Amino acid sequence: MNTATRVLVTGGAGFIGSHYVRTLLGPSGPGGTQVTVLDKLTYAGNPANLDPVRDHPGFGFVHGDVCDPVLVDKLVSEHDQIVHFAAESHVDRSIAGAEAFVRTNVLGTQTLLDAAVRNRISTVVQVSTDEVYGSVDTGSWTEAQPLGPNSPYAASKASADLIALSHHRTHGLDVRVTRCSNNYGPYQFPEKVVPLFITRLLRGGRVPLYGDGSHVRDWLHVDDHVRALELVRTRGRAGEVYHVGGGTELSNRELTDLLLEACGADRSRVDHVEDRKGHDRRYSVDWTKIRDELGYRPGKDFATGLAETVAWYRDNPSWWQPLLDRAAL
Ligand SMILES: NC(=O)c1ccc[n+]([C@@H]2O[C@H](COP(=O)([O-])OP(=O)(O)OC[C@H]3O[C@@H](n4cnc5c(N)ncnc54)[C@H](O)[C@@H]3O)[C@@H](O)[C@H]2O)c1
C-alpha cells in the first residue's frame, strides 16, 4: 500500500505558499499528498487564502511561528518533506526596520533546518529570490554567481540560503534552493506593486512610481513559480540551487503603463515619488539549468496573466478591501 507523502508548508497562508497548497491539493496536484501549513498569520498571512482547500481531507493548518523550536520540532517529526515559504517579504518594510526580517528569515530558517536534521526529513525546499545577487545592468546571473544582496530583505534571504546549503554540506540534509524572479497573480497582499496599483486604480485612486521608473524586473505568474517548485521538490537534486525565471522583463514605467491600460486609466493617475533607498536597478536570472534538468518552462504569457489578475481583483474586493483598511494602504 502506498503511504501519502506528508509535506509541511511554512508560510502557506501567504501569496505564493497558498497558491502552492491550493495547487498541490487541487485537481492538477499529484494526489496522495498530505499538507500541513505552519503559518504565524502576520499581516501578510490570510486564512481566507486557504478556504478552497480547507475541507480537503489531506489539509491541516497550524497557527504558529517558524522560530518556535518546540513547535517546529514536533511538526517536523510528523512530516516527510518541507517546503519553506515563511518569510517577511516586503523590501520597503525591511528598509523601515530589519529586525523581523533577520528573526523570521534567518533564525526561522535555521530553527526549521535543525529540526529537519534531527528528524531525518527527506527533502527541504528553501524558497528564495533573485534579489540575493544584488543588481545587474546587463546579462543574467547563473547559479554560480556570488551573492551580493543590497536590501535588508535580500540580505536576510541570502543568509537563509547559506544556512540551508550549509546544512546540506555539513549534515547531508537534502536541501534544494530555488531563486525566483518577481511573482504576480491573485491573492497577493496589496502592498506589493502589482496589487497595490490595481486596487488603487480600481478605486479611482492614484499610484506612486518610484524615481524615474527605469528599474527593471522579470515578472513571472505565480502558477509558473509553483510548477517550478513542484519540479524541484519531486525531481531536483540535493544541495543544488535552481533559478526560476523566464517571465516578462519590464521597467516599472512599462509595468505601470500596462496596469493603467488594464484598469482603464491614464498617466494622469501617476505620482512620481522619491526613489526607494538603495533601489536595485535590475534583476535577471538565467534559468537554463531548471529548463534542461527538470523540463521547466513558463506557461503563462504576461498579457493573459495580467488581464486575469486584474479581473480577479475586480471580482474580489471583499478579499482585498479589509486588508487595505487594516494596513492603511
Ligand atoms: N513575492 C515574490 O515575488 C517572491 C519572489 C521570489 C521569492 N519569494 C519568496 O517566496 C516566499 C513567499 O513569498 P510571498 O510573496 O508569498 O510572501 P507573503 O508575505 O505573501 O507570505 C509570507 C507568509 O509567511 C508567514 N510568516 C511570516 N513570518 C512567519 C513566521 N515567523 N512563522 C510562520 N509564518 C510566518 C506570513 O504570515 C505569510 O503567510 C518568501 O520566502 C519570499 O522570499 C517571493
Image (tube, rainbow, N blue to C red):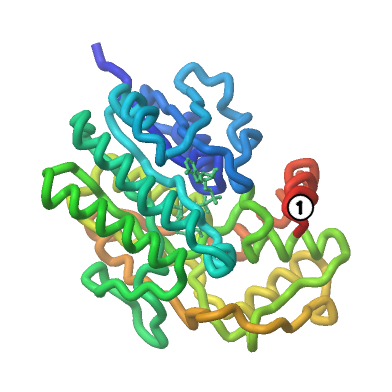
Which residue shows up at 39% across the image and 61% down it?
A: 156
**x and y percent of residue 28 in the render?**
46, 34
The residue lying furthest to the top in this view is 1
Residue under pointer 1: 324
Which residue shows up at 83% across the image and 76% down it?
A: 269
Which residue shows up at 84% across the image and 81% down it?
A: 268
Mark 1 Cα within 10 Å, few/some/many (few <14, many 20+)? some
Residue 28 visible, this orientation: no
**Location of residue 245 (image quadrant):** bottom left
**x and y percent of residue 304 in the render?**
62, 59
Q: In the rendered view, tell whether residue 308 sits above or below residue 26.
A: below
**x and y percent of residue 148 in the render?**
33, 75
Amino acid type at mark 1: Leu
Which residue shows up at 32% across the image and 61% down it?
A: 159
In the figure, is residue 313 to the left or right of 123?
A: right
Q: What element carries label 1?
A: helix
Figure quadrant of the C terminus: bottom right
Q: In the rendered view, tell whether residue 181 sits above or below residue 62.
A: below
In the figure, is residue 203 to the left or right of 187?
A: right
